[in-house]
Amino acid sequence: MATNGVRALTALADPTRRAIFEALPQAARSVGDLAREVGVSSSAVSQHLRVLREARLVMMRPEGNRRLYSLDPRGLADARDYLEQFWPSAIAAYSAALRTAATETT
């Protein structure tokens, strides 16, 4: 079973979903606004938003007869937590590469 962090990264792997996600940091947006900005149909945006909501990357709030979407910090935290587990080994590998490069140049 995939973790929430993996779900978030998987959801962002699609370029259209990533474009929708990247359009949201400034303000909450409607499906119609997102469709115009991203250049796909409202129906397609709604389908992509469903995937982003399931990954906890966006959240929806009703406003009158519209639904406004904004970033959900929970999904970003999930992705960050997932990636942070790799930092110790990445830093160790970088340190080893620096030591090797220093040894080769002397």
Image (cartoon, grey):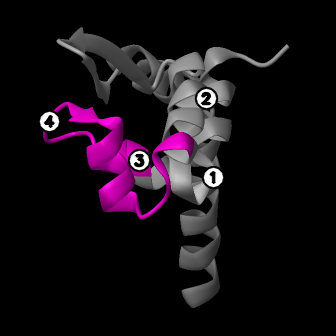
Residue 55, position in %: x, y? 58, 22
The residue carrying mark 3 is 20
Local SS, label 1 = loop
The residue carrying mark 4 is 27
Q: Is 72 above or below relative to 92?
A: above
Local SS, label 2 = helix
Is disc 1 surrounded by few (<14), some (14 to 19) or many (20+) residues within 10 Å?
Answer: few
The residue carrying mark 1 is 14
Q: Which residues are magenta?
A: 20-43
Q: Residue at position x 42%, y 64% from top? A: 39
Question: In 3D space, how far apart are the residues under numbered discs 4 and 2 (Cα atoms)?
Answer: 20 Å
Whichever of callouts 3 and 4 sits on the residue coming sooner in the sequence is: 3
Q: Is 37 above or below relative to 82?
A: below
Question: In 3D space, how far apart are the residues under numbered discs 1 and 3 (Cα atoms)?
Answer: 10 Å
Q: Residue 51: which numbered mark, if any?
A: 2
Q: Taking the image as drawn, is residue 85 in sight?
A: no
Local SS, label 3 = helix
Along the horizontal axis of the image, is 64 left or right of 84? Answer: left
Q: Is residue 13 magenta?
A: no
Question: In 3D space, how far apart are the residues under numbered discs 4 and 1 (Cα atoms)?
Answer: 22 Å
Question: In 3D space, how far apart are the residues under numbered discs 1 and 2 (Cα atoms)?
Answer: 10 Å
Is disc 3 surrounded by few (<14), some (14 to 19) or many (20+) residues within 10 Å?
Answer: many
